[in-house]
Image: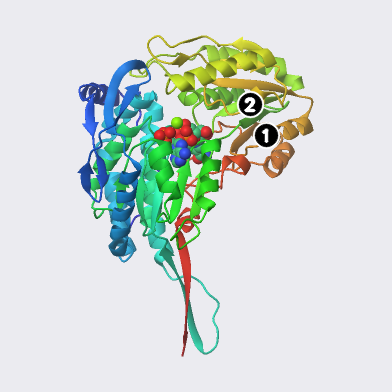
């Protein structure tokens, strides 16, 4: 019997002992830079001729590790291995499957600081962000383990005279897992072990910006008792390995998280029936955001400035949930803006190996160029009042940036930047704020700062987004507590970490017997 689910506590780095442990882990990990990691297909290591060099975004010439650049053929072999493993795994008792997931969580706890350190170097997360990422990965394992057991229990059906009736959930088959780089342990792990807990097998194609963390998670998976082939690991480009997995007639489902354009492309290609394909592919596609916080005339402006700054600049704004629009009531606009600028200016930017740097680099050159081009666009559309400075000499560092006086329909207020750039938009009144809030194609996270209970009620009803927060930051959804996923162009609303998630990877069978 599993204990009731409980969220994993974060490491407290104000405690000297924890800081020392993290320093040690950073040192150890830095000593392991440049190692090569294999693909894992059917439990066996495999290599390809081409490689992916994963670089440290804070020191751009530093090679953190080398992953394989798999080919379409590797994706197909991995699908074969996954189908082979499915025969046994689908018959494995849910309690046994759950045990593999909780074993994985335990391994992650044992190697926590080390995995945190890899995230600091491979993705530029600060210590707390890296640790939260790993805690979320652990939570996904623990939560979905319990969910698998819950779905295996007797399901309610209405009685009917002369018959016994039951409904059972069965898995779908072998699927593709295609995560982004920005939560390299949490999202990769959750997207893989959710379907697997439900009895499916998967091929994981990690993002090309974070394959080393993927490989580290895979190492732990291999030590956690999953039979070979249940979770396969094939790094490679999205256009080759990703494409092969998406279009294969042998792929039963696709679990994708990433950008809108890639997501829409996957939805389209997955819909096409291929020769020999027996099913309609299931697709979960969780995509981007243009998330907003309303700062109402009756808000606590200090709390609002804090909440907005943390949501906008945490992990350099590279979260799908990041606040990229502050919608501020005219009556408090100037006062709020002043506090926000002051708060943003306190943020220290630099390599996050140093705990003092709260903001690190953006992930790569392309991201840096994209962010800079949006700062340019935004400066033309509004007034640059904070930040804007950047340097790509050592790593890809961009200062926390605020553009104010932005029109709600400006590009900087509509398009996902995925960097530390916040648009501040003036609303005439509360109605106008709600209208601006809903005026994008996205609908992922959002929030409001106000002390007025009626306005809270209205905002809860009218703000069209999957995760809504009142008087706090709009990032950091907890597994089991705030199931995560959005509307419209933010995706299919998979609600990761929620009690409906496993259903996406199962199908129900009704069984009726005449007595
Ligand atoms: P991305 O560029 O869309 O990539 C996501 C994944 O898709 C990567 O593994 C990528 O591989 C792969 N891919 C690329 N092209 C593909 C193709 N043609 N076929 C199949 N797979 C393909 O996104 P990202 O830059 O990694 O992540 C940032 C985005 O993710 C942002 O838009 C963010 O908002 C979103 N996100 C959403 C959520 C959510 O829960 N809604 C959570 C986190 C992030 P390569 O790396 O090899 O290109
Ligand atoms: Mg990418």
Q: Are marks 1 and 2 in contact (CB under 8 Å)?
A: yes
Residue at (52% x, 24% y) in the render: 310
| Residue 117 position within the rendered picture, expressed as x and y whole percent measured from the top left | 30, 27
| Residue 333 position within the rendered picture, expressed as x and y whole percent measured from the top left | 71, 18
Quarter of the figure with the N terminus: bottom left
Q: Classify residue 237 as left or right of residue 512.
A: left
Q: Is residue 412 visible?
A: yes
Q: Which mark is residue 363?
A: none
**Image height of 96 relative to 437, above or below:** below
Q: Which residue is nearer to you in this view: 206 or 266?
A: 266
As helix, strand or loop, the secondary structure at mark 2 comes to strand
Q: Classify residue 130 as left or right of residue 328.
A: left
Residue on which disc 1 sits = 440
As helix, strand or loop, the secondary structure at mark 1 comes to loop
Q: Residues within 10 Å of mark 2 (few under 14, many from 20)?
A: many
Q: Classify residue 423 as left or right of residue 52.
A: right
Residue at (70% x, 19% y) in the render: 406
Q: How many marks?
A: 2
| Residue 48 position within the rendered picture, expressed as x and y whole percent measured from the top left | 25, 37
Residue at (38% x, 23% y) in the render: 124
| Residue 147 position within the rendered picture, expressed as x and y whole percent measured from the top left | 41, 57
Q: Which of the two discs, 1 and 2, sits closer to the camera?
A: 1
Residue at (56% x, 25% y) in the render: 417
Q: Which mark is residue 325?
A: 2
Question: Distance of mark 1 from mark 2, alpha carbons?
Answer: 11 Å
Q: Earlier in the sequence, mark 1 or mark 2?
A: 2
**Image height of 357 relative to 450, above or below:** above
Q: Which residue is nearer to you in this view: 153 or 319?
A: 319
Query: Residue 160 lies in what quarter of the image?
Result: bottom right
**Image height of 149 relative to 32, above or below:** below
Q: Residues within 10 Å of mark 1 (few under 14, many from 20)?
A: some
């Amino acid at each position: 019997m599993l204990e009731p689910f409980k969220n994993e506590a974060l490491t407290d780095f104000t405690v000297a002992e924890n800081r020392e442990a993290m320093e040690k882990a950073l040192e150890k990990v830095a000593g392991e830079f440049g190692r090569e990691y294999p693909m894992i297909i059917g439990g066996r290591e495999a290599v390809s001729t081409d490689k992916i060099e994963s670089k440290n975004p804070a020191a751009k010439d530093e090679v953190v590790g080398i992953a394989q650049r798999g080919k379409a053929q590797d994706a197909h072999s991995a699908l074969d291995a996954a189908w082979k493993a499915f025969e046994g795994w689908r018959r494995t008792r849910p309690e046994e499957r759950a045990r593999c997931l909780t074993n994985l969580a335990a391994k992650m706890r044992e190697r926590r600081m080390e995995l945190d350190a890899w995230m600091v170097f491979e993705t530029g997360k600060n210590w707390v962000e890296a640790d939260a990422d790993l805690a979320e990965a652990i939570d996904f394992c623990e939560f979905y383990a319990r969910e698998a057991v819950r779905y295996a229990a007797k399901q309610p059906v209405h009685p009917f005279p002369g018959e016994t009736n039951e409904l059972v959930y069965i898995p779908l088959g072998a699927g593709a897992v295609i995560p982004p780089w920005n939560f390299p342990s949490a999202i990769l792990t959750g997207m893989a072990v959710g379907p697997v807990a439900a009895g499916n097998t998967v091929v994981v194609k990690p993002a090309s910006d974070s394959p080393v963390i993927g490989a580290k998670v895979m190492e732990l998976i291999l030590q956690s008792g999953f039979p070979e082939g249940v979770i396969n690991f094939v790094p490679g480009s999205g256009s080759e390995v990703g494409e092969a997995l998406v279009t294969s007639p042998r792929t039963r489902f696709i679990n994708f998280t990433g950008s809108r354009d890639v997501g829409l492309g996957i939805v389209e290609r997955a819909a096409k029936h291929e020769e020999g394909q027996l099913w309609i592919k299931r697709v979960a596609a969780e995509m981007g955001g243009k998330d907003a916080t309303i700062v109402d005339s009756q808000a606590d402006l200090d709390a609002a400035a804090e909440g907005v700054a943390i949501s906008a600049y945490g992990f350099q704004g590279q979260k799908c949930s990041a606040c990229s629009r502050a919608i501020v009531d005219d009556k408090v606009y100037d006062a709020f803006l002043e506090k926000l600028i002051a708060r943003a200016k306190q943020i220290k930017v630099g390599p996050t190996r140093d705990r003092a740097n709260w903001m690190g680099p953006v992930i790569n050159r392309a991201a840096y160029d994209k962010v800079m081009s949006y700062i340019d666009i935004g400066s033309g559309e509004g007034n640059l009042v904070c930040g804007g400075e950047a340097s790509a000499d050592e790593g890809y560092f961009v200062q926390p940036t605020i553009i104010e006086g932005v029109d709600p329909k400006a590009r900087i207020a509509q398009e996902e930047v995925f960097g530390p750039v916040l648009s501040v938009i003036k609303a005439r009144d509360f109605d106008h704020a709600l209208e601006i809030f809903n005026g994008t194609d996205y609908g992922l996270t959002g929030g409001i700062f106000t002390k007025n209970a009626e306005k809270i009620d209205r905002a809860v009803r009218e703000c069209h987004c999957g995760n809504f927060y009142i008087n706090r930051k709009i990032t950091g959804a907890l597994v089991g507590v705030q199931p995560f996923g959005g509307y419209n162009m933010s995706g299919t609303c998979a609600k990761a970490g929620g009690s409906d998630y496993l259903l996406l990877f199962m199908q129900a069978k009704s069984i009726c017997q005449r007595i």
